[in-house]
Image (tube, rainbow, N blue to C red):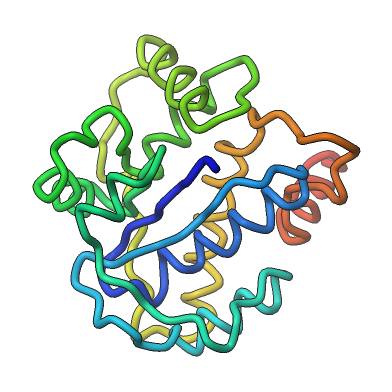
Amino acid sequence: MPHIVFVCTANLCRSPMAEHLMRERLKARNVGWTVSSVGTHARPGASLDPNARAVLRRRGAPAPRNWASRVMSAKVLQSADLVLAVTHAHLTWVMTLAPSMSRRAFVMGQFATLLDNASGSAVSPQDLIALATTARALIQPYDPAADDIADPIGGDERVFEQCADRIEVMLSSITRLIAPGEGEPTTSDDPPSLRRQSRRNQQR
């Protein structure tokens, strides 16, 4: 089973939100990939941040009550077909721990930007990586800090909603090239908030 791993610091906010939102998007496309998340400095067994849990519930991607944080390990990273880190610093930690992942690990925002400029269809994470690699030549230089997702820890629900919005936009860029599985997709893979924004843009 193809496996995607998201990486943040404590595995309490950004990476678990990306994990659950990505899982719902894949489910909507009838794609049965495994999705998980870890933290570079996680305390194993810690509960999901309450604000992150609330945001996920409102977006139709509720986390299980018994969900618990996991610390990043070389074993987990090497089990993945694709690793997506929330910042460049986290990608550095990934590469320090598992140098063999150099062709399978990216900053999430960078990967989304590459796929925004790609065309084609993917039936596996390896296909996504190939499309992203081909698109590198089409990207104009930009500030890599723009790829990073700020940590919402300590913020209110509004801050977490803004963080989730950024994650959703990136995930939309990533999943748009994933070929649906057998049968018709069950729903649009864009969350209601993005669909409302799209409709507003079309009306202008």
Which picture quadrant has residue 185? top right
Query: Who's the residue at 56% across and 46% down the image?
Result: 171
139 or 55, nearer to the observer: 55
**In the rendered image of this protein, does residue 156 appear above or below residue 194?**
below
Residue 193 at x, y = what percent?
73, 61
Q: Residue furthest left?
A: 96
Residue at the spot 33% in from the left edge and 63% down from the top edge = 150
| Quadrant that contains the C terminus | top right
Would you place residue 34 above or below residue 60 in this image?
Answer: above
Horizontal relation, residue 95 to residue 63: left or right: left
Residue sitting at x 71%, y 53%: 194
Residue 176 x, y percent position in the rendering: 66, 33
Residue 84, percent from left and from top: 37, 46
Q: Residue at x 70, y 43 (%)?
A: 31
Instruction: Work out whether residue 111 or residue 127 is closer to the camera in this orientation and state it.
Output: 127
For the residue pair 146 and 32, the one nearer the viewer reads as: 32
